Amino acid sequence: MNHKIKFIIAVMSFGTIGVFVRNIALNPAEIALFRALIALIILSGYVFITKNIKNLIVDKKNLLKLFISGAAIGFNWILLFEAFNHTSVALATLSYYFAPIIVVVLSALLFKEKLSFKQVLCFLAATVGIVMIVYTGSLEDGNIIGILFGLSAALLYASVILINKRISGVDLVARTIFQFLAAVVILVPYVAFTSGFGILGLNFIGVANLSILGAYHTGIVYCLYFFGVSRLRGQQVAVLSYLDPVVAVILSITILGESILPIHLVGGGIILLATFFNEFKRKQVIR
């Protein structure tokens, strides 16, 4: 399959995640746990089938970073799924796409990286977009809680991006396997001591959607995404990645029947444009 087509399938699939999560009657933490577990099994099987076991050898320095970033991924999913529960998939997704802008700000604060005029301008524009999304109408209908969960997920994912930038010499699939393993290790006791396990009470529709979320959206789609990123030009990745939020917004309105105000769409558009111009050469947002 053409690498561009693989990447397009991946990013469009990410845009459908919210629809599947809505059909899983479990606590967000438990959904995140089984998403990581199912994907871990799929990716581990892929490594064994392709006989790339040697790629799983990781030094201790990188192992610690992988564990921390994996734990962050797990809780990032929890926050994103909570966002889906409290607001529309469209608003949750648009809020989540503030992550690349957060990366720029944190890089300046934590690593003393200089901000260019373009980066400052994009940050200000994206902030205006967020303010428009957190419109007074959202305060009245309770969407603000979901938007805050989405922004919190974006902050946590930004930390994952920053940690991954410090990991070198690790195969992309192997990196993902270790991160999902860390997520499982952290989330098992977290779920046990918080919401408890309700997987046995899940109906057929819930099981089917959870299986698709873990096996397809996370196991298979992650592979397609990484293959695309490694073989496509940065500009192609930047442009095609925006199919994700576009699909999410369309499905939110057409399939889930969720309403969204024009000001929210304008605000979301500003965030995506600001992110696009800021991250044109290295756009990566994974859900």
Image: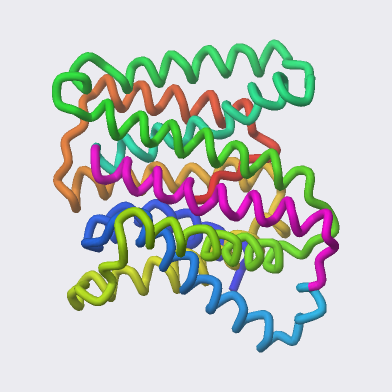
Q: How is the image coloured?
A: rainbow
Examine the rendering and report whether any part of residue 5 can be seen: no
Which residues lie in the magenta part?
Answer: 57-86
The answer to whether residue 250 is magenta is no
Quadrant for residue 209, please give it.
bottom left
- Does residue 247 appear left or right of residue 168 in this picture? left
Residue drawn 15% across the image and 20% down it? 140
Q: Position of residue 122 (x, y in %)?
A: 58, 18
- Does residue 281 appear left or right of residue 187 in this picture? right
Quadrant for residue 7, please give it.
bottom right
Residue drawn 53% across the image and 24% down it? 274
* Up/down of 19 relative to 156, above or below: below
Examine the rendering and report whether any part of residue 279 can be seen: yes
- Does residue 167 appear left or right of residue 282 in this picture? right
- Which of 125 and 141 lies nearest the eye of the viewer? 141
Q: Position of residue 121 (x, y in %)?
A: 60, 12
Residue drawn 56% across the image and 47% down it? 72
Q: Position of residue 112 (x, y in %)?
A: 79, 20
* Up/down of 140 relative to 3, above or below: above
Farthest front residue? 193
How many numbered dots are placed on residues in this image? 0
Quadrant for residue 110, please give it.
top right
The answer to whether residue 85 is magenta is yes
- Does residue 275 appear left or right of residue 217 in this picture? right
- Which of 231 and 283 lies nearest the eye of the viewer? 283
Which corner quadrant holds the N terminus?
bottom right
Residue drawn 46% across the image and 25% down it? 271
Q: Position of residue 131 (x, y in %)?
A: 37, 15
Give the prevailing secondary structure in the magenta stretch: helix
